[in-house]
Image (spheres, rainbow, N blue to C red):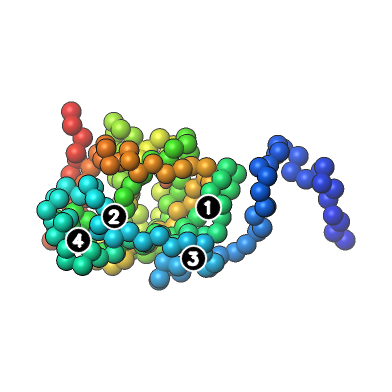
Amino acid sequence: MSAHRVPETERNPAVSTPPPRTPTLPFAAALDAATGSVSPAALLVERRVSDLAGLYADDAAWQAAVAAGDPLVYRVCIAPVPEVAGEVPFSITTIEAGAIGGECFMTKGHTHTAHEGEVYIGLAGRGLLLLFDGAQARQLELVPGVATYIPPGWAHRTANVGDDPFRFLSVYPGDAGHDYEWVLRHGMGARVYRDGSGQQVVSTIQS
Ligand SMILES: [Fe+2]
């Protein structure tokens, strides 16, 4: 059967007028669970200890870590998908193994500025997904073979609770938006510490 070109007026009939921008074309990206790379990638974001000011409970330990070389905590390799409504961006985050004052290396954490959810899929290592809606806190194990769902309205942060780099794939609506200030002001309702036998979750919710 021969293919034919669909007239402009018959394409995507359920979609109203799209925003005036260059259309995104279909593409495949290689995801490397061993390195955390996405190829092709549009952007690589790196966060060091100094980028996490005000987020760790032990400020003296945080300052000491900055002074002692300011190591890399995590990086995000982002696929070339526009962050606009209708698109579905994705990225791989790698959190190194480590702790500050016993508190696990973690992402800054954020809420979405729009009422949108997100999916995290474990790729390598062992992580914990922290969720907080301002009243309730939840923690979910995030390891290879597990997909975790972040509902709209829940702030989210990930922490590396293992001894190797922890990697996960994020898939989110393009118009979700990122608000980091909310977590800086309100926290995540819990903190994750490492001890000899594993991780320990300490609630920080005030009654
Ligand atoms: Fe998010």
* Most foreground residue, 72 or 92: 72
Residue ID for mark 2: 51
Closer to the eye: label 2 or 3: 2
Which corner quadrant of the image does residue 98 belong to? bottom left
- Amino acid carrying label 4: it is Val
Number of dots carrying numbers: 4
Spatial CA distance of label 3 from label 4 is 29 Å
The mark that comes first in sequence, 2 or 4, is 2
Looking at this rendering, what residue extends furthest in the front direction?
Answer: 67
* Most foreground residue, 148 or 54: 54
* Most foreground residue, 164 or 70: 70
- Whether pointer 2 and pointer 1 mark residues with C-beta atoms closer than 8 Å, the reply is no
Q: Quadrant of the C terminus?
A: top left
Residue ID for mark 1: 89
Name the residue located 55 percent from the left edge and 59 percent from the top edge: 80
- Amino acid carrying label 3: it is Val
- Horizontally, residue 186 falls left or right of residue 169, namely left
Residue ID for mark 3: 38
- The image's mark for residue 66 is 4
The mark that comes first in sequence, 2 or 1, is 2
Estimate the x, y position of residue 64 in percent, counting from the top left: 14, 60
How packed mark 3 is, by other alpha carbons closer than 10 Å (few <14, some 14-19, many 20 or more), is many
Q: Secondary structure at mark 1?
A: loop
